[in-house]
Image (cartoon, rainbow, N blue to C red):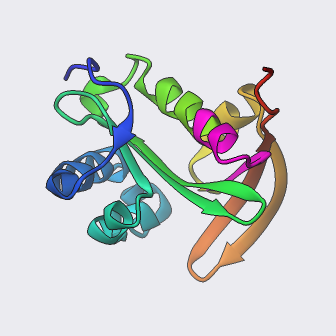
């Protein structure tokens, strides 16, 4: 899979690609956590229509879902197709999230990850995210993180 195309807002024609990348990226967690991760059951068409879904790669091989909230940008999910792991797409999408937060004038990004997705528990603090709390939301045991996004210097 190529990473030639930079992040862009997803369009209606991307729904199947978004679903495929998300399912491929999160599918291996089903056995570990005992349920389907929430991003696998998201309404991708609605997210795209709302302008929350952004994709990268030609063909699409990376997806990030960003939801502006009053005082922060919520990073709802990030997915990189297994065939594109190690190519820098994940980092590119995380940097894009920071750019979006700055562009929207939001000083913080918040996210959560399942408590059994231990890879993320090593990654997020390493790239500047601070653990804020552990909370059970229905069937999901989630670790919440935040990262301050300084305004861009003029």
Q: Quadrant of the N terminus?
A: top left
Quadrant in which the C terminus appears = top right
Is residue 120 placed above or below 136 in the rendered structure? above
Q: Where does residue 96 sit, x and y in percent of width and height?
A: 53, 32
- The residue under the point 26% across, 17% down is 4
Q: Which residues are magenta?
A: 99-112
Magenta residue check for 53: no
Residue drawn at (76%, 34%) of the image: 125
Left or right, 69 with respect to 56, comes to right
Where residue 16 sits in the image (x, y, percent)?
16, 55
Q: In screen coordinates, is 94 left or right of 153?
A: left
| Viewer-side residue, 74 vs 28 | 74
Q: Residue furthest bottom?
A: 138
Q: Nearer the viewer, residue 152 or 137?
A: 152
In the picture, residue 100 is in which quadrant?
top right
Q: Position of residue 114 (x, y in %)?
A: 59, 58
Please indicate, yes or no, whether residue 73 appears anywhere in the rendered image. Answer: yes
The answer to whether 50 appears left or right of 82 in the picture is right
Work out which residue is located at the far front of the displayed protein and give it: 154
Along the viewing direction, whichever of 60 and 130 lies nearer the viewer: 60
Camera sees residue 80 = no
Reply above or below: 58 against 139: above
Q: Residue at x 63, y 40 (%)?
A: 103
Q: Position of residue 20 (x, y in %)?
A: 20, 50
- Dividing the picture into quadrants, the one containing residue 76 is bottom right
Query: What residue appears at the point 27 percent right and 34 percent down from the top-left corner?
Result: 61
């Amino acid at each position: 899979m190529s990473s030639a195309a930079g992040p862009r807002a997803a369009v209606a024609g991307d729904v199947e690609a978004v679903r495929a990348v998300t399912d491929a990226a999160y599918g291996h967690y089903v056995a570990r956590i005992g349920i389907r991760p929430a991003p696998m059951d998201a309404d991708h068409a609605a997210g795209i229509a709302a302008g929350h879904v952004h994709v990268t790669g030609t063909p699409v091989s990376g997806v990030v879902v960003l939801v502006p909230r009053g005082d922060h940008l919520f990073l709802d999910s990030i997915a990189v197709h297994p065939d594109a792991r190690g190519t820098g797409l994940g980092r590119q999408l995380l940097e894009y999230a920071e750019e979006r937060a700055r562009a929207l004038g939001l000083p913080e990004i918040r996210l959560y990850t399942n408590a059994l997705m231990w890879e993320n528990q090593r990654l997020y603090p390493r790239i500047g995210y601070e653990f804020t709390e552990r909370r059970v939301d229905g069937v999901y045991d989630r670790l919440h993180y935040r990262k301050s996004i300084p305004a861009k210097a003029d």
